[in-house]
Image (cartoon, rainbow, N blue to C red):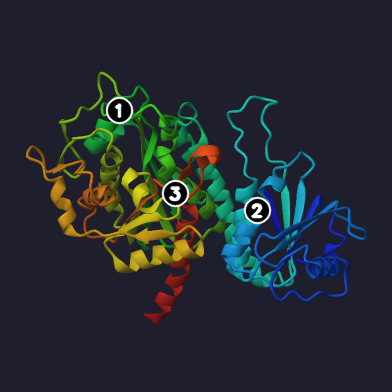
Amino acid sequence: MDFELKTMSLAAARTERCDLLVLLVGEGFEPAQDALSALAALALKQGDLKTGAASMLQCYAPPTVTARRVVLLGSGQGTAAELRKAALALAPLLKAGKTLKRAAFIFAQAPAPEALGALVRSLAQASYVYTTTKGKGRAEPRTLARVTVGVPQAAALRAAFDAAVAVVAGVEFAREWANRPANHATPTLLGEAARSLARQGTIRCKLHGPEQVAKLGMGAFMAVAQGSAEPLRFIELHYQGAARSQAPVVLVGKGITFDAGGISIKPAAGMDEMKFDMGGAASVLGTFRALAELKPKINVVGLIPSCENLPGGKAVKPGDVVTSMSGQTIEVLNTDAEGRLVLCDALEYARRFKPAAVVDLATLTGACVIALGGVRSGLFANDEELAARLQAAGEAALDPCWRMPLDEDYAEGLKSAFADVANVAGREAGAVTAAKFLQRFVGAFPWAHLDIAGTAWKSGAAKGATGRPVGLLVHYLLGLAESAPRAQRRK
């Protein structure tokens, strides 16, 4: 879907050629001398429209307005959260039929940059439709192809608009790959998706197969993959927007393209949703897709250990001891705690880049879903500045996270009589003990772990990937890129 930002008055909006015209009416609305203002003022006066977010009044072919359909949509005080609520309320209308190809959204009052960004991102979310594996003629694809956003002064909002459009591209790339069934998103195919990003020009991609991974000594990663006939892939992406001397941020995404649990097999009910267990990998890919659009002055490395976790004659067994790339041995007490096994080798690999920071993201634990539900991702960090930046980025992107503890006492349950560490502790504080396991492989660099098990996808009637936390990551990276020149000037 294409987005366009234009300077547009309400008088000019009257003649905008589109299938749907949406006028955003917030608190303090003051009508001008034009047809749309008169329509909104009358609706407010009669009580048929409220200025509260998502209050809606639909009109068909109103006189003197070119658009066939007009919606008056309340936007409250114009906050980002209210604009998101208003946009999502339009989801049924945006997916209603094949005749809706072009829409225009007009602000009666100038929006704040963050509110404009929220509207753009939410419109894409509300109109998204997955069709890749549906039969020909049976799918109803998104028909909305172009959205024009009209504001009183476009120049002042261009940067926020461009960032939002890039996030949309990244989120939709992530949603597409996370939504694909596991036989349409194997580690090999995920590697090809990463390779496709290299066509953007600013991104390099390197794919490591089983032989290369074996030479690297990634014994924990290989142990997870050995139960599947699908060959593993270790995906390495590089975005260079700054001088080579600038230390990169490394993003590590868990890429388990299907997780049956291995020998510690999961219950059958809901196992189909384990195709979403590569949500971390999808978000890394989506973030690089956004970086290719925005070209910020920052260096970023993406690492994705990708494989399937299946039971089989060659599968790793409970009680087996494997040797990680770091040399630490791991007793595999539960083969369904495989995400931390693939991530620990990727975290060790990340050290070679001497990173400014490392952020791993993974659909890691059901315990985090119990703790935080589907609202906030769990955030664990060994560095206060990194944690604060990620939290602020999440709030700005409406993609929030919540800081969780990393007390050393939580590591007690990971002790093993037969290896340096066990891959699971007890049931208590499962999200925290998983993070403590990963922390053993981090070293001294600033590190954060985002447990997105509750936020990467939705179940039930709305089943599907969310593309989170692409928004959070992009806002975090843009913030770093903006702060770097200021830091240089202070030196």
Tell me the tag on residue 275: none
Q: Amino acid at mark 1?
A: Ile
**Residue under pointer 1:** 265
* Amino acid under disc 3: Thr
Residue 162 shows up from this direction: no
- Please provide percent x and percent y for residue 461: 55, 38
Q: Earlier in the sequence, mark 2 or mark 1?
A: 2
Callout 2 amino acid: Ala
Between marks 1 and 3, how big is the CA–CA gap? 23 Å
Give x and y (percent) for residue 442: 24, 53
Above or below 193: residue 311? above
Q: Camera-side residue: 323 or 10?
A: 10
Decide: few, some or many residues near mark 2? Use Cα within 10 Å; few <14, some 14-19, many ≥20. some
Residue at image mark 3: 455
Q: Earlier in the sequence, mark 2 or mark 3?
A: 2
Quarter of the rendering containing residue 406: bottom left
Farthest-out residue, right:
63
Residue underneath mark 2: 89
Q: Is residue 431 visible?
A: yes
